[in-house]
Image (cartoon, helix red, strand yellow):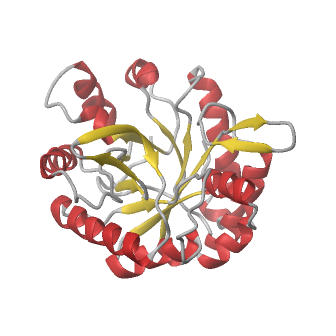
């Protein structure tokens, strides 16, 4: 196992650590660059899951990916939730902390979805205020992830890539560039995925996600749905190649959250991403598994 600083995520491929694979990681740790956990699954102070994560964390760099902050909520952030997240961060010292450009809370009710925002100055002011609050409360620079989307708002005054760029510029946060989400949204809204890459400040990108998606066919058209339930599609691998050609080596995370396969299947997807990283890193720095 590679050595690492407690706060570092290497420019290698990681996988999302899901409960079904935790025993594999404890009993026979696989050769993978790093792991990501969903923050809200580990907010409790004890229990077997947290104890298993403590054991696994000794062997791997780790990132915390949140799904419950609701950064786009005009009601502001839940201070108790932030406090629990801060306790989690202080306990496990993740190398990266990330959340979504979306909203999911209204009137104290948590909705089981990551809902879209209009790309307006008003929405931008709200999410920037919340990102500033979260970064101060957590004591860490965050990455914010571009969404997958299926509807657009007539009130939007800017494209998504400009909205993402402004969040990073105004708050100093980084960007978690989800390449699958770019492909999904580009198909659904009929824009050019490479135009998205042109518009995002690449120097703010701190991590890349790839995942599988579902193709919903109708009589006259198809919609892509970001379900994280299948192997990465070839157009997404191609977009990742073009992204890495611009960025160079970056931490890449393979997500698989539904229809979770056996661990070797997930590790094979990670190996494909690692091969793409090897293609853009200097020969002397290439990882040998």
Q: Quadrant of the N terminus?
A: top left
- In the rendered image of this protein, does residue 287 appear above or below residue 117? above
Please say if 236 is above or below 59.
Answer: below
- Residue 133 coordinates in the image, percent (x, y): 21, 66
Taking the image as shown, residue 147 lies to the left or right of residue 150, namely left
Residue placed most toward the observer, 63 or 149: 149
Residue located 46% across and 60% down the image: 117
Residue found 25% across the figure and 70% down from its top: 132
Question: Picture coordinates of residue 171 (x, y %)?
Answer: 32, 76
Which residue is farthest right? 220
- In the displayed structure, 57 sits above or below 181; it is above
Q: Quadrant of the C terminus?
A: top right
Residue 58 visible, this orientation: no
Q: Position of residue 248 (x, y in %)?
A: 62, 69
Q: Residue drawn at (52%, 56%), measured in percent from left and top?
A: 251
Q: Nearer the viewer, residue 162 or 59?
A: 162
Picture quadrant where residue 178 is located: bottom right
Does 204 sit left or right of 67 as displayed? right
Q: Residue furthest bottom?
A: 169
Q: Quadrant of residue 264?
A: top right
Q: How many numbered marks, from 0 up? A: 0
Picture coordinates of residue 242 (x, y %)?
73, 65
Visible in this render: residue 289?
yes
Q: Is residue 29 left or right of residue 179?
A: left
**67 lies above or below 74:** above
């Amino acid at each position: 196992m590679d050595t690492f600083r407690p706060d570092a995520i290497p420019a290698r491929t990681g996988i999302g650590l899901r409960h079904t694979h935790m025993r594999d990681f404890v009993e026979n740790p696989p050769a993978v660059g790093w792991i990501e956990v969903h923050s809200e699954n580990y907010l409790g102070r004890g229990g077997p899951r947290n104890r298993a994560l403590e054991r696994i964390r000794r062997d791997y760099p780790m990132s915390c990916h949140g799904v419950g902050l609701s950064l786009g909520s005009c009601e502001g952030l839940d201070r108790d939730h932030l406090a629990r997240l801060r306790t989690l961060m202080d306990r496990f010292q993740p190398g990266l902390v990330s959340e979504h450009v979306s909203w999911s809370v209204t009137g104290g009710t948590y909705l089981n979805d990551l809902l879209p925002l209009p790309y307006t100055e008003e929405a931008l002011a709200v999410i920037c205020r919340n990102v500033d609050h979260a970064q101060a409360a957590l004591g860490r620079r965050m990455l914010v992830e571009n969404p997958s989307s299926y509807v657009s708002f007539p009130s939007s005054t800017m494209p998504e890539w400009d909205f993402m760029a402004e969040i990073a510029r105004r708050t100093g946060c980084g960007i978690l560039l989800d390449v699958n989400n770019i492909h999904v949204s580009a198909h659904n809204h009929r824009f050019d995925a490479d135009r998205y890459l042109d518009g995002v400040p690449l120097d703010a990108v701190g991590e890349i996600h790839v995942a599988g998606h579902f193709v919903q066919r109708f009589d006259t058209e198809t919609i892509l749905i970001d379900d994280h339930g299948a192997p990465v599609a070839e157009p997404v691998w191609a977009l990742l190649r073009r992204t890495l050609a611009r960025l160079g080596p970056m931490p890449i995370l393979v997500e698989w959250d539904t229809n979770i396969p056996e661990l070797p299947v997930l590790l094979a997807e990670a190996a494909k991403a690692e091969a793409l990283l090897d293609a853009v890193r200097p020969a002397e720095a290439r990882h040998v598994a």
